[in-house]
Image: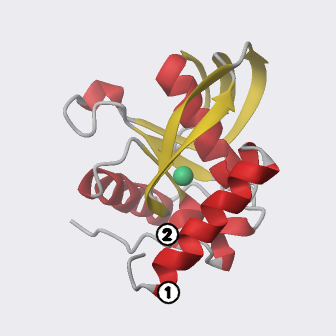
Amino acid sequence: MAAIEILKYPDPHLQQECRPIETFDDELRAFAQDMVETMHGAIGIGLAAPQVGDDRRLLVADLSVGQDPEALLVMANPKVEREEGEIKGDEGCLSFPELILVVPRPAEVVVSGQDLDGNPIRVEAEGLMARCLHHEIDHLHGVLFIDRVSPLRRDLARRKIAKRIRAGDW
Ligand code: NI
């Protein structure tokens, strides 16, 4: 078990564009495994590489939080090929402890990418999985869930965070 520290907003790693993965080797596979363990350890359903300080386009997702090995998705270079509809729903992020925002996301997405051997994969998702994938892919482009809400709500959230940082509760 090698859990990695999860960076919290406003760490600059969280606001950078990530680079495409070109090398599919043992180091990448070990790093992906560490990300999975970190996500499970934090009881999260998704984690993106920049959240642990890495600038590669890699995400892990698991709606079962470790209960069902079949539910685990590890994806390199994920890209939203198609999105449909829009649903507003409660959303959190491991880089924003205990902050919940209502965020609009596509109801359905088709995502293409690669597995850890570099083979192409394609995932069709709806509901929570579509929300999760869209959120994690945003991370790979430096986009955070607070960027997806209205300026008013974003400002409110930022003030709440600043207050918690000052209070040492972040
Ligand atoms: Ni997140």
Q: Residue at x 53, y 65 (%)?
A: 51
- Circle 2 is placed at which residue position? 52
Locate residue 58, reporting x and y percent.
Answer: 58, 52
Q: Which one is earlier in the sequence, the residue at label 1 or at label 2?
A: 2
Tell me if I can see residue 55 in this picture. no
Locate residue 115, reporting x and y percent.
Answer: 54, 38
Of residues 109 and 78, the one nearer the viewer is 109
At label 1, which amino acid type do we have? Arg
Q: Residues within 10 Å of mark 1 (few under 14, many from 20)?
A: few
- To which quarter of the image does residue 3 belong? bottom left
SS category of the residue bearing label 1 = helix
Locate residue 133, reporting x and y percent.
Answer: 58, 34
Answer left or right for 148 relative to 136: right
Q: Residue at x 55, y 67 (%)?
A: 160
Tell me if I can see residue 137 in this picture. yes
Coloring basis for residues: secondary structure
Rendered view: 39 above or below 5: above
In the picture, the quarter occupied by the N terminus is bottom left
Judge: label 1 CB < 8 Å from ligand 1: no
SS category of the residue bearing label 2 = helix
- Circle 1 is placed at which residue position? 166
Q: Residues within 10 Å of mark 2 (few under 14, many from 20)?
A: many
Answer left or right for 74 relative to 85: left
